[in-house]
Image (cartoon, rainbow, N blue to C red):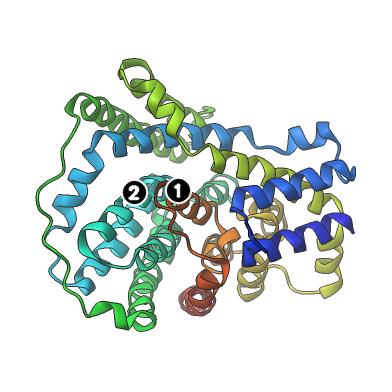
Amino acid sequence: MISIITLAIVFVLIAVRQIGNIRFRIWQIMLLGAVTVLVTVQITPLEAIKSIDIDVMLFLFGVFIIGRALEESGYLSGISFRLFSKARSPDILLLTLVFSMGLLSAFLMNDTMAIIGTPVVLLLARRTGMQSKILLLALAFSVTIGSVMSPVGNPQNLLIAIHGDISNPFVTFVRFLFIPTMLNLLVVFLLLRLVFRKHFNILPEVFSPEPEIDYKLARVVKISLSLFVLLVLVKIITVFAGLEIDFRLTYIALISALPVLLFSRRRFEIVRNIDWSTLVFFAAMFVLMASVWNSGVFQEILDSLKLDMTSKGVIMTVSILLSQLISNVPMVALYLPVITGSGTTTPSLMALAAGSTIAGNLTILGAASNVIIIQNSEKSTGVTVTFWEFLRIGLPLTVINSVIYWLFLSI
């Protein structure tokens, strides 16, 4: 039970974040949990190393390089200027942010938009006077929900698209999940507008002047972005054409980062300033979650419940809750064979995609993108979102999201 107790303590520490005068960051808490299960031999060093998903780590490294170059070049600020400069009210600003980030995450993946979007919303907060936490929450919720409707919106959807025996996955995801996703993005706007209504009495300042741009670095990062989009398209084509090509997302991220690493004179500065603490968090999380899963406690709980594990309502509920404990990607990898082995229907697979993804709206640990956003914000400005601030909005939002997806998938 040491692994379970350690996980519980990690959750508590992430919730309070402070003991006496000592204030912890999320990555420090998760690292402490991983060290604990290693020291107490709940997992061997070899098992711990094997549990770390190298593909995820390298993917994040590559995208971190691109995201940092976007920020350092000023190109990201320029895009923000053009996109948001005409927003003359907080409502229009928030609505534009929610739908633009949500739609982009469906194509560029939620983790990518979390990396790219965090400096954007922090810049918006500085320039408009909007509270940073409102915009950070809007970003976190919108990239999570937006990624639901695409087979390449997040890694777990890609697993379902590849191994779920879905004919024409792109059309299928859009057909079942596009409309409820649009409604749920609107719910994000309405809920944040309601909870933070006192902060919507200000008028955003005019974006002036347009930010300075390092044009040399901007040209290089444009090549990286173009490569990323092109390679994602190639990935989509190879998957849907049924081609047996091992073209991983990791390769896309690393190849796209190469122009920055090879041709930018600021390459060392960029590498030095990427968010290394988030990479430490993920490595530690993989170790702790592997230890928890190896304990067998959750498997016993699921077996004892005697539920119909292929029911859409059960699939969504189990996906949301279990994703908080072992993360959504490994959860889908474990749950998918249960569903496909039962000869289930496409709506059930879509329920798995929706439930495992919107699990990220319940707590900070429900999605990697949440951690990326909060860690990047803490590192660059010191502004954070606490566990309870996230849960206060995330809990009702997740309930509403679940109901909307369940209703549409049950029609």
Name the residue at 64% across, 48% down: 28
Give how far apart the Cα atoms at labels 2 and 1 are.
8 Å
Query: Please, what is the three-letter code of the amino acid marked with disc 2?
Result: Pro
Q: Residues within 10 Å of mark 1 (few under 14, many from 20)?
A: many
Left/right placement of residue 293 relative to residue 20 reads right
Name the residue at 80% across, 57% down: 6
Image quadrant containing the N terminus: bottom right
Q: Quick check: marks 2 and 1 in contact, CB under 8 Å? A: yes
Q: Which residue is mark 1?
A: 376
Specify whether residue 153 is in view: no
Left/right placement of residue 374 relative to residue 122 reads right
Q: Which quadrant would residue 68 be assigned to in this image?
A: top left
Badge 1 marks a residue whose secondary structure is helix
Q: Which quadrant would residue 186 be assigned to in this image?
A: bottom left
Name the residue at 34% across, 23% down: 260
Q: Position of residue 83 (x, y in %)?
A: 17, 54
Q: Residues within 10 Å of mark 2 (few under 14, many from 20)?
A: many
Badge 2 marks a residue whose secondary structure is helix
Q: Is residue 313 above or below residue 225?
A: below
Q: Position of residue 208 (x, y in %)?
A: 10, 53
Name the residue at 43% across, 56% down: 147
Q: Which quadrant would residue 360 be assigned to in this image?
A: bottom right
Query: Please, what is the three-letter code of the amino acid marked with disc 1?
Result: Asn
Q: Which residue is mark 2?
A: 119
